[in-house]
Amino acid sequence: MNTTKIPGNRTWFVGLAFLTLFAASNTRAENCDAPPTSGEAYKLINRGSGYALDVAGRSTEDGANVLQWSEHDDTNQQFLATDLGNGYWSLLAVHSGDSLEVADSSSSDGANVQQMGYSGESNQQWQFKKSSGGGFAVVARHSGNPITAESSSLGANVSQTTLSGDSLQRWYFNPVNGNCGGAIGEAPTIHMLGDSTMTEYDESRRPQMGWGEAMPMFFSEESVINNWAKGGRSSRSFYYETTRWPAILPTIEEGDYVIIQFGHNDQKNGGNYLEYGTYAFCSDGNGDGENCADVEHSYYQFLKRYVLETREKGAKPILMTPIVRKYFSGDSITERGQHNLQSSYSGENYPRGDYPAAMKAVAQAYDVPLVDLTAETKAIVESYGDEAATEHLYIAADSTHPQVLFATLIAKAAVETLDTYGLMQGHIVEASSLVASPGELDWGNRFVDVPNTKKLTISAFDLVPETGAVDVTAPDGFLLSDSADSEVWSSSTTIDFTNGAFTTNLYVQFTAASEQPYTGEVSFALEGAKLGSVAVSGTGVAAGEGVASYSSWFTEGSSVTPISDGLVSAGDALASNLVAGNTKTLAVDGQDTSVARYRVEGPEMVARSDDRYLQFSVTAESQTFYVDTISAYLTSSGGSTVQADIEYSLSSDFSNPVKLNSEALSFTSDTMTLKEYGVTVPVSAGDTLYVRIFPWNSAGNTGKYLAIYDARITGISGE
């Protein structure tokens, strides 16, 4: 389980408690960045211009125009904020009693803002979206557009425009009574139950990201998010697994929220059915989930259990339908991609059914808030299309698991729906539209004048305009490129985008010019407005001091290309008398991972052969490389009969090898296991260390593989 206590620089979204109306005073306040309190009067000060929201000419007439003007103490610049529930507010001009509204209920950009007698219509209801740069976007319920000062000039008109990062769309709520900081709801504790599409992944797995990882960016710093999701779990297996629901339930306290999302792995069949499989409603074809003869293989019944057991703890369940798989037919996601299985599996008498429909039935029967992420993600993926969704939304290995951008868009959609239910009010925030992974880059010690490169995965969404270029700049000592092997590096570059979003890799090269620390940030800006930044740091040291170095292979499915850091280089992984099979998704440290597999089958493979191996080679560059660890995640795939030895040598002909394992390595089928060996092997500058893994299949039967992930040689470079 990963518990996230959201770090600083997050603020809240809407103020909440309904308080009694009061007679306003005329005390002027400094700009207040706290949410409003219901029943209090406020001046709305524009962040971009510094002017106040003003009913023109102090008019009390219906239809009087609203503009911005120099701040004063008259009541035509004072607005009474009232919490209407479900995250929406009214704003009534104190001098007239009329409501702030968008004229004619228009949804168009440029529609005028005026005052009108209060009717309670949606064009008179407002949502206050907290901005990380200060103030709030005041967003009309009917259109989703905020009120905007049309320029920074005195007397500029106020209208609604499409939500963007423009400071002219941000307003401070300065309390007339001078008391900044109304009461907000208690910070939520959120428990997330789900599978590999929700779970958290190590930074080394980027661009893969579970959407639950993106949730903290949409919540205040006081919020606590417990992401209990785990790859490969279904509603059934998660319920019974000792480290999942039986261990989670005792930690849930009164008032907590429990988000429940399963469905992908409930569709497992064959040998996995007994442990994981469910039917959407009932396994006998009955569409009434309340009356299943076999409750142990009913998705409906397990969702019901989570809901009722959560409520027994005094907590609040929330159901979220599974995200779509990227299964296209023409321009649309198929029914199967939407988890509606209308054809029976071989050996089964009935189709599994419609999983989202079953979840909706539970939500309706037990009055549970429901977020339809199947519909939300269907709309997102179809808007990209098959080719672009493959490039920007899903990882290359499959059509199920999100990349960073998609994970962020899913979390955003989930939170926006939660907000419409009025849940977690005061703690949902307006997130930055730029997401960087990792969140910072630290090179540690690096030799002077020796360049070293690291990769950033950058994603952005909700960019305005929808087509343009993001400007990227780096501080002294750091250069940028779109390729790790580029011959052209610069202190600045641009990232072109369309459709208001992008995901891309950016490479940052650090070269210390002298023995000193280097710190700064890689900054991202759009049309002069800063989107975000990534902290970078490193220290230049003289030759002879230690520099951490490593090379690794098979971290991206079947790719044999190495990844190296520090003062080493590496060759591609070499397969001798082994044939690569298809990749397979297996759990690595609890995270679904696409791993490489090599066939180990047939009578000639029943015993080890010195001519059958995978080889990895690493070369020390300018300094001696002191190898301290050799490791790899390994297993026998398709059965448990594949075994292996691991050896290393300092000779290209692999003479005088050293064996690392004392006994032949054996594995449980399809269970990735870290095999890690501490060594002390100095590799002189210019020399190469070779590591070989020798697999064999003691049964000699077919359909067996050696599965491998993250073969790694690690140590320190220095003299």
Image (spheres, rainbow, N blue to C red):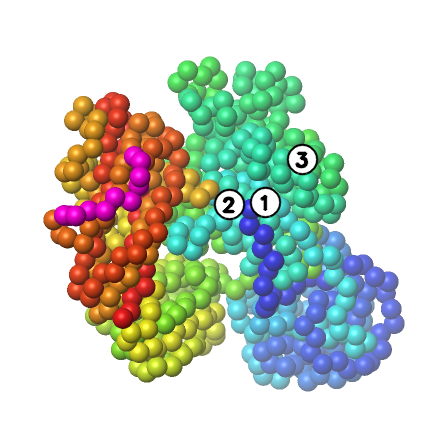
Q: Cβ–Cβ below 8 Å for labels 1 and 2? A: yes
Q: Position of residue 36 (x, y in %)?
A: 74, 67
Give whichever of discs 2 and 3 has the lower sequence position: 2
Apparent side of residue 465 relative to residue 652 in the rendered image (left or right): right
Residue type highlighted by circle 1: Met
Q: CA distance from mark 1 to mark 2?
A: 8 Å
Read off the residue under disc 2. Answer: 198
Compared with 85, 440 (above or below) is below
Query: Residue at the spot x=40%, y=35% of the render?
Result: 671
Read off the residue under disc 1. Answer: 192
Apparent side of residue 213 relative to residue 694 in the rendered image (left or right): right
Query: Residue at the spot x=61%, y=32% of the render?
Result: 303
Helix, strand or loop for disc 3: helix
Q: Quadrant of the C terminus?
A: bottom left
**Of 438 and 632, the residue lying toward us:** 632
Helix, strand or loop for disc 1: strand
Give the residues in magenta: 654-664
Q: Position of residue 42 (x, y in %)?
A: 75, 73
Q: CA distance from mark 2 to mark 3?
A: 19 Å
**In magenta stretch: residue 554:** no
Residue type highlighted by circle 2: Met
Residue type highlighted by circle 3: Val
Query: Residue at the spot x=26%, y=74% of the render?
Result: 450
Apparent side of residue 201 relative to residue 420 in the rendered image (left or right): left
Q: Which mark is residue 593?
A: none
Label 3 neighbourhood size at 10 Å, few (<14), some (14-19), many (20+)? many
Q: Position of residue 538 (x, y in %)?
A: 39, 73
Residue 51 location, quadrant: bottom right
Residue 566 location, quadrant: bottom left
Specify the principal SS of the magenta part: loop
